[in-house]
Image (tube, rainbow, N blue to C red):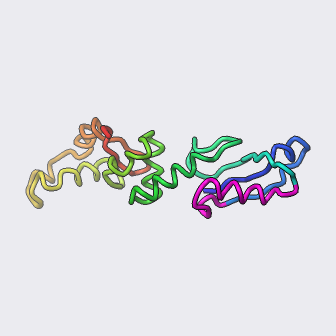
Amino acid sequence: MKAYVGTYNKYNNGSIAGAWVDLTEFSNYSDFIDYCNNLHSDESDPELMFQDFEGPKGLYSESDLSEVYDYLDALDRSGIDAEAFEAGYELDIPLESIADAYYGQYRNDSDFAYDYSAGLIPEHVWPLNCIDWHQAARELMCDFIEENGHYFYSHY
């Protein structure tokens, strides 16, 4: 995740001078703000302006990036990879519930349904070849949600 950090003063005076800053290089929001204030030390009291952002939507505003660090903390604690965590976030699953709701990653709904059935039907038994996995997936999706190939329980 990165943010382009300028200041309101510079912007209001016709300049977008600033820099892209990798937010993952800082252990907390306070360290990030200290770095940004040093970046704009040419102003006595810089009012920071986050003019652009690369990362999950909804984590930032023009004047605040504190939610990014809540997100990064929850990602660290989750134990799942960043892509899966972001998919859960995009589905509006609360940060603290994403890891518990995560089921797995699949190429499509049919593969998901087939994997979900593992253990319910013994392997190499004839019904496996006769099941309409697309229909089975449609039935399962009343209890699951999907984003970018990542499947989550919808009742988290």
The location of residue 139, given as percent across then percent down, is 24, 37
Above or below 108: residue 35: below
What number of labels is visible?
0
Along the line of sight, the residue nearer the viewer: 121 or 133:
121
- At horizontal 57% and vertical 61% (from top left) the residue drawn is 27
Residue located 83% across and 57% down the image: 41
Which residue is rendered at x = 59% and y = 51% of the image?
Answer: 55
SS assignment for the magenta stretch, majority: helix
Image quadrant containing the C terminus: top left
Residue 55 on the magenta segment: no
Left or right position of 111 against 22: left
Residue at the far bottom: name it: 25
Q: Give how far across and how far down residue 151 sits, in percent.
A: 35, 48
Q: Position of residue 123 (x, y in %)?
A: 12, 60
Tell me if 112 is positioned left or right of 26 in this view: left
Along the line of sight, the residue nearer the viewer: 81 or 70: 70
Span shown in magenta: 22-42
